[in-house]
Image (spheres, grey):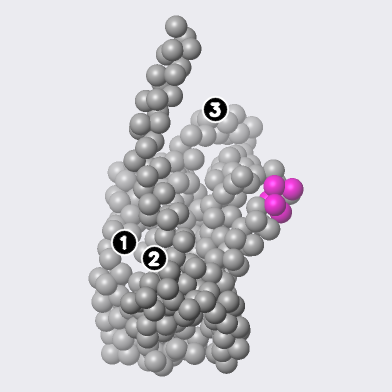
Amino acid sequence: MNKSLKKKDAQVLFLIALPGLLHFLIFKYVPLAGNVIAFQNYNLFQGFLNSEWVGFDHFIRMFRFEDFSRIFLNTLRLGIYSIVFGFPAPLVLALLLHEVRALWMKKPVQTLLYLPHFLSWVIVGGIFLNFLDVKGLINGLLLRIGIGPIDFIGDSAYFIGTLISIGIWKEVGWGMIIYLAALAGINPNLYEAAMVDGAGRWKRMWHISLPSLMPAIVVLLLLRIGNLMDANIEQMLIFLNPLVRDVGEVFDTYIYRVGLLGSQFSYTTAIGIFKSVIGLLLIVFVNSLSKRTTGESIY
């Protein structure tokens, strides 16, 4: 009887999971076969079954490309800055918001922080391109205190900082949801016991909140490092312009410009594979390091 029930439960669970499994199979795994065109001179009309095989020629061309090192360093720099400045921001915000006891203020603040995530990059781009223009609102305020004008979007010295700041503004509220959920799951008795022992807010945060969040922090950081070479293509396409191409051109924008607009599918697929291999190596290495040092890992 029990065996029959377990079998039925397994069948029901399989049926529930089936749409998700089919989604991953069709949209995630089947397209991987398309990477084969990186080893061909792919022709749209001949398809990958009849296109000419060229081995590693496109990879060799990629490494010989004179701007390869510049684009690689730009991608690496943008990814590292995004992690250094962007990753701690939701955590800090969640810890600060967790300490707010006035619900009448906490809920509206949370909602306001979530809102930018739901705006498309087209809208966000339109807002900030106007605000940050040389004759825009921000420069108007800076001029009143004797600074500027500063070309935030067209000057290479400010472009990366501007890009990172806008990205944080848009996603910080959404990113803190996981931390707030984890904080809500902490046993309140721990805080009460700490208060009885005389621990202030800072010590409660340092000795209770942060250690409780550590598994979530490690997993999210590992996933973020795995995507180190991925830029937000929508954001990049909106803000990137010829004046800052020397620091703003990354693999994703190069693949879009040369691969899609220039129809060099095989060459840019080789670049995409290179990016994926770097991401895979990074996540394996950092996951192994985290497992040995903190005991936390994603597999």
Is 200 displayed left or right of 155 in the figure?
right
Q: Is label 1 in a helix, a strand or a loop? A: helix
Tell me the quadrant of the picture where the C terminus can be found. Answer: top right
Look at the image and give the residue range highlighted in magenta: 288-292
Task: Using the numbered discs, state the Cα–Cα distance from disc 3 to disc 2 in whole angstroms.
Answer: 34 Å
Q: Which residue type does callout 1 highlight?
A: Pro
In the drawing, what numbered circle is on residue 169?
Answer: 2
Question: Is 37 rendered above or below residue 97?
Answer: below
Question: Is 180 rendered above or below residue 224?
Answer: above
Q: Is label 3 in a helix, a strand or a loop? A: helix
Residue at image x 65%, y 52%? 287
Task: Using the numbered discs, state the Cα–Cα distance from disc 1 to disc 2 in whole angstroms.
Answer: 7 Å
Whether the magenta-drawn stretch holds residue 290 is answered as yes
Please state which of residues 42 and 217 is positioned toward the viewer in this rendering.
42
Most frequent secondary structure within the magenta stretch: helix
- Residue 215: % across, % down: 59, 44
Q: Residues within 10 Å of mark 3 (few under 14, many from 20)?
A: few
Pick whichever of labels 1 and 3 is earlier in the sequence.
1
In the drawing, what numbered circle is on residue 189?
Answer: 3
Q: Which residue type does callout 2 highlight?
A: Trp
Whether the magenta-drawn stretch holds residue 210 is answered as no
Residue 248 visible in the shown view: no
Residue at image x 34%, y 83%? 261
Please state which of residues 202 and 90 is positioned toward the viewer in this rendering.
90
Residue 13 visible in the shown view: yes
Task: Using the numbered discs, state the Cα–Cα distance from disc 1 to disc 3 in whole angstroms.
Answer: 35 Å
Q: Which residue type does callout 3 highlight?
A: Asn
